Image: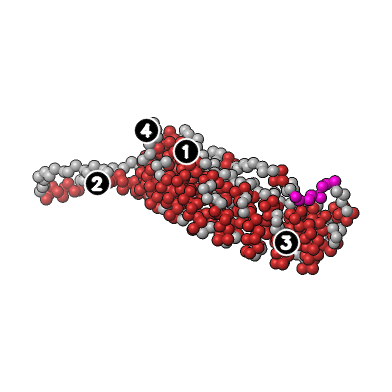
Amino acid sequence: GAGGGGGRGGGGKRGRRRGGRGGDYHRGGVPPGFVDDSSPATPRSELLETFRQSRSARKFELADINGYVVEFSRDQYGSRFIQQKLETATDIDKQLIFDEILPAAVPLMVDVFGNYVVQKFFEFGSVEQQRVLAEQLRGHVRELAMQMYGCRVIQKALEVIEVQQQVRLVHELRGCVMQCVRDQNGNHVIQKVIETIPSKQISFVIAGFRGEVVALATHAYGCRVIQRVLEHCNEEQVGPVMAEIVPHTVRLARDQFGNYVIQHILQHGAAADKQRLILHLKGHILVLAQHKFASNVVEKAVLHGSETDRHALIEEVIHALAPDGSSGVLVMMRDQYANYVVQKMLDVMSPAQCQQFIELVKPHLHTLRKFSYGKHLVAKLERHMHHPHHQSLRQQHQLHHQPPPPQRQQQQQHVAPPSMQVAAQQHSHVVPVVQHHQQPPLHMPQQAPQNHGRNVGHHAQ
């Protein structure tokens, strides 16, 4: 599962996560204490050879492999055959297969093909078969959780078994929760534990994160687990986690993995938690918007913050000054990351702020077109400039600031005699009155937005 988010390191190619290996069995080998008799050197039975050679010529049924189920489960084609048949098998055929795999269940759980057969029973087996099969996990949960195929079996089991059995199995992870969280396989098991088991039943898991939240939030796998905690745990458990996150908001926003956690809170968190994070972001928007990872965070703050916070963030940008004294808005429009933040702000800013923004950048449109990151932003800005609402607002603004017309001096008018007035009317020409309106806004040709290499997925799981 992805950490969340997309775009500039928020889940895109540039932000691809990498993790270390915790041992040979992480790559699909067999954990210590497990028996592996699936070596390719083991000769195949005549039945399996016949099946492999004539898979399309003869129609096999589950009853045909009676006595060879485990061997078929370890074979690529045999495993696929069993999985397909189990989906529509009768209860009698399911029990026939189940009785054979049960004694070899644990070795099959760590087998490259056999694990899928075990998973299929958790998906299509009876409730009793699921319960009995899950009991085979007892005593092996820790090793299986950190094994490539075993971790998938545990996750599938946790999705279907009763809560009491879930709790019994998960308690085997006491003392190794942090090891699992940092493991490329074990972290998926911890995530599934948090998702499927009532939070009150797994307090020992959450308690293990105390004092380690920031370290986990900046870890390739730990950041995923922290997000699951924020999604599924109760307020009493989430409160201490947030208390560790909030003081480090800016640091986490800049981190290649921590930014996922901050984005998640801004998008899905409680209103009060969003406000606390945004309070720490304020005053740093110009700098954060130009950062590869933090720019995603600023966008989320603009999109999902309250109306008051959003207004304040945009005001900060409009009045920001770069270190050289130039306009912060122009710096952002030229930046490879910050220009996307400006685009999001244009989508949500108030009409008054939009007018203020347009007046600020309008004299610099020609210069901005020379920058690769400014071209598509200029096109979007011009659409706002030519929108009827903003044209009307601009005209009102201009009329409001026009100097008052000079007052006419009252002069004594000479009234001609009636006979001369009639003659003047007969020889007069009507001269149209020319009204001097304000100059219309300069029309500039629109240009299609360009991607410029940015991953536009900006939002996974």
Look at label 1 and name its amino acid.
Gln
| Mark 2: few/some/many CA within 10 Å (<14, 14-19, 20+) | few
Whether residue 38 is in magenta: the answer is yes
The disc, 2 or 4, on the residue closer to the chain's N-terminal end is 4
Q: Position of residue 170 (x, y in %)?
A: 63, 57
> Toward the viewer: 307 or 432?
307
Mark 2–mark 4 Cα distance, whole angstroms, equals: 57 Å
Residue depth check, mark 1 versus mark 2: number of the one nearer the observer: 1
Q: Is residue 22 above or below residue 271?
A: above
Residue depth check, mark 1 versus mark 3: number of the one nearer the observer: 3
Asked whether the beta carbons under mark 1 and mark 2 sit within 8 Å of each other, the answer is no
Which span of residues is magenta-colored? 33-41
Mark 3–mark 4 Cα distance, whole angstroms, equals: 69 Å
The disc, 1 or 2, on the residue closer to the chain's N-terminal end is 1
Q: Quadrant of residue 120?
A: bottom right
The residue that appears at 60% across and 59% down in the rendered structure is 196
Q: Position of residue 429 (x, y in %)?
A: 23, 45
Number of residue marks: 4
Q: What residue did someone put label 4 on?
A: 325
Look at label 4 and name its amino acid.
Gly
From the viewer's perspective, is 50 left or right of 186?
right
Q: What residue did someone put label 1 on?
A: 290
> Toward the viewer: 340 or 137?
137
Q: Which mark is residue 430?
A: 2
| Mark 1: few/some/many CA within 10 Å (<14, 14-19, 20+) | many
The residue that appears at 76% across and 53% down in the rendered structure is 107
Q: What residue did someone put label 3 on?
A: 133
| Mark 4: few/some/many CA within 10 Å (<14, 14-19, 20+) | few
